[in-house]
Every structure is written in C-alpha cells, then in structure tokens.
Image: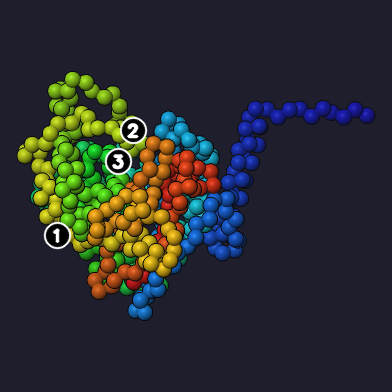
Amino acid sequence: MSVAKRSKPSPEEILAIQALRKERKEKKELELLAAANNGALAVKSSLLARPWLTVSQPESSSTCRVRLLSWNLLAQCLVRRELFPTSDCLKAAQREHMIHEELSRQNADILCLQEVDRLEKLLPMLENAGYSHHYASGRGKQHGCLIAFKKTMYSLISSKVVFYDEENIGMDRTVNRLGGSFKTRNIGNLVALRSNANENEGVVIGTTHLFWHPRYTYERTRQTAILVRELLAFREEKASNTWPCIIGGDFNFTPSDPAYSLLSGNDLLESQIDAIKPSLVVHASLDSRVLNNLPTVLSASAEEESEDADPDKVITNARPATAEDGLLTVSELSDWFSKLPSLHSAHDEGLKAARREGNVVPTYGDRISLPSGRKGTCEPSYTSYTHYWQSVLDYIFFIDGVNRPVTVTGLLAPLHESDLVPGLPKKGISGSDHTCLVAELSW
C-alpha cells in the first residue's frame, strides 16, 4: 500500500502560518504582562535591577499618593547606526520588548512618555496592563508625547495640547507676540485626571519634549515658560487649584542651563546670560528670506534636523533677531519667570534626602560643580548616555496644590555610569538612549 506524498505548503500558506505564530506569540506576551500587572504573576526581568529608595514618610495629613514614570523611548524613526555606534540593540525587535518590560516592571500609576512612535505595538501592551492614554504630536511629526494612567485609579476629565510655535509669550496670552526663534513643532501634552476613589481629588499631569538643539537656549527657555503658564491656566480652567501639577519630560537642558535655574527659582548667573544672548536669532524656518543672504545652505530636511543629529552643531541658517521679531530680552525672560511659581524637582529634592540617609547614589553635582545654593546639584548623574553625548535632560517637576504641599516619598535609584557604558540603548539596561525616572509623590 503506497502512502501519498505530502505536498509542500504554498508560499501563501507559509506566510499565513508565520503570521498566526507571530499573533499567538504576541498574544501570549500581552497576557503575561497583564497577569504581572494584576499581581497574578511575578515578573522575572532580564533588565538590571534598580533598587527603590524610600526618601521620606508622607505627612500625616496626606490622603493621596501617586507613582509616576517619565521616559523618552527613543522613536524608532529617529534611530541611526551612525548616532549609536556602540549600541547592541537598535532594531525595533530588540528594543521594544525591553521598553515594554521596563514599563511593566515599574508598574507606575501614571506614565509620561516622549518620542513615542509605533503605537500599534505600544498601545496593546498598555491596554493589557490596565492603562488608558492620551497621545499628541507636533504637526507633521512622526512621534509624539503620551500620558497613560491606570484606569482603576483615574478618569480623564480634560486634555490640552500646547503647540509652542503658536503660543504668544508673556503672562497675557492675548497679546499678539510669538517671539519665537525656530519653528520646532515641539509640544506639551496636558491632562486633568480625577481620582476614582474620591471625586474631589485629582492631579494635573503634563509631559513635554522641548527643542533639542544645544545652542538654541532662548527657544528652549521660551518653551519652558509657556509650558508652566499653560499648565497653571489649564488647572484653573479644567480642574481644581487644590490639585497638584506634575510634569515629567525630556527638557533637553541640564541643571546648569538658564531654563533650569529660572524654572527652579534661581537668578541667572552671568555665564547663563552669556549663553542666552547668542541664541537670540531667527531661523530660516520662520523667515525664509534668511536663506537668500547665506553663502551656503544645509540640505537637511526639517525632520532630519532633529534631536538625534550632531549635538555639537553651531547655529546655522539663522540671522540675528531685531526688535521687530519680538523676541524677549534676557531681563524680560527673567521677569516672566518671576511671575510664575518656582517648580520643585522630585529628584533634586528626593536624592538629596536619600543621601542624607546614607544612600550612595550618583548625582549631577558629583561630576559638575555648581555654585553654592544653586538648585540641581542632586539631579541624577545622567539620564541620557550614548557614545557621543552623556547628559542630564529628563526631569519630574511638580507644583503644590493650594494648601496641599507635595512630599517626595520615594524614587527609583539612578543607574551608575558603569552600567551605562559604552552607551545606550544597551541590552539588559535600557531599550532607549534615556533611562526612565520614577518618583512617588504624596499630598
């Protein structure tokens, strides 16, 4: 008796089988993540463990507590091998599972994420982990900012997107004065979240990704002031002044930067004033006539002239600003910030308290000397670390609610430089070129 020879599957059948296997694998991964977030499964992480630092006890009057994570995920559309020559994981398939694993194991109540793309991969993971979300991006950008929150804890009552390019400067938003130096397409993403446990309680959350270019100090400082002004106005209009405001984001400035000092209530140093003055320019993205007067013109497109380009570039394709351009003077910038509340940094305050308790944690002040009394000394030593740049760019800031002071009660310990070399993204450490920040706040 002869046995019929089994025919080989067709190319279409092979593709269908592969697609089915991939679908089953992804479904299984999502089920495991959901189980882990529901406490039904212990997460066995392939990532380096980072201890939790309890830095203080909440005030006896505190009734609310939130754990917030902020992280720049490194958009896949911006990844270039030449920018990360020492990285061992640049492909999406290598990085994404590490990013999802980090988000899952931290299990924060609220997520502030920047450089978010490939939503078709991220959103199912967040949904299965119990999060709702609000996503926004700059006009025409391929990546954006996302705020996610645990559905069991919070309900979204309002949201707003701040387009920095389109916002007037100063305290009076109705005065027609943009005062911008570059069309950056950067945004702020704001949400008001009401507590499901107590409808009178809630929190206002913001996330942002400020302009990347190191030399455009004025533009970044302008965007910072707009963000704080709009956040406070949003709280006034859509929430309650007793609710605190928390901002997690990639600000693209260091604790030595003028914007950090103004934001945290320090006066500007002469060196910081000197850093602002050369950036009082108008780029060709705002005035195309600039190009007519330049001997040479860079051929990079607007998307290529992005954060992940050479960070040592000088200002190009720009002209000095004139009075008619409406940019703020240094004294006008300082005056604007003086009318805004000073922001608290969760890590500058929290790591300072942790070190007082004897914890050995690396800080910015260990490697960069700041004048006595300046804020920022106890920010993490690094939040972004690659072959070409190593810096502190990411922060979690907060503003107290009226008669509701906020206390930093815990932090995820920063990574040491020895963990980060030769550069991120790095297997077992971070799927992004940034490290995530996590803080627990009580009020």
Q: Sort mark 3 into few (<14), some (14-19) or many (20+) by Cα contacts within 10 Å.
A: many
Alpha-carbon span between mark 1 and mark 2 = 36 Å
Amino acid bearing label 1: Lys
| Residue at (57, 50) in percent of width and height | 46
Which residue carries the number 2 mark? 310
The residue that label 3 is drawn on is 212
Q: Around disc 1, counting alpha carbons within 10 Å, would you say few (fewer than 14), some (14 to 19), or many (20 or more)?
A: few
Quick check: can you spot residue 305? yes
Q: Residue at x 27, y 67 (%)?
A: 400
Where's residue 219, x and y in %?
21, 43
Residue 308 versus residue 257: which sits nearer the camera? 257
Q: Secondary structure at mark 2?
A: loop
The x and y percentages for residue 130 are 48, 59
Whether residue 227 is visible to the viewer of this picture, yes or no, is no
The residue where tag 1 is placed is 339
| Mark 2 or 3: the one toward you | 2
Image coordinates for residue 242, horizontal then vertical, percent: 26, 70
Residue extending farthest top: 295
Name the element at disc 3. Answer: loop
Where is the N terminus found, in terms of image quarters? top right
Farthest residue toward the right? 1
In the shown orientation, is residue 248 left or right of residue 226?
right
| 104 is higher (above) or lower (below) than 17 | below
Type of residue at label 2?
Asp
Q: Position of residue 112 (x, y in %)?
A: 38, 54
Instruction: Tell me whether the residue at label 3 lies in contact with that at label 1, contact meaning CB atoms closer than 8 angstroms.
Output: no
Please, what is the three-letter code of the amino acid marked with disc 3? Trp
Looking at this view, is 409 or 96 the one in front? 409
Structure colour scheme: rainbow
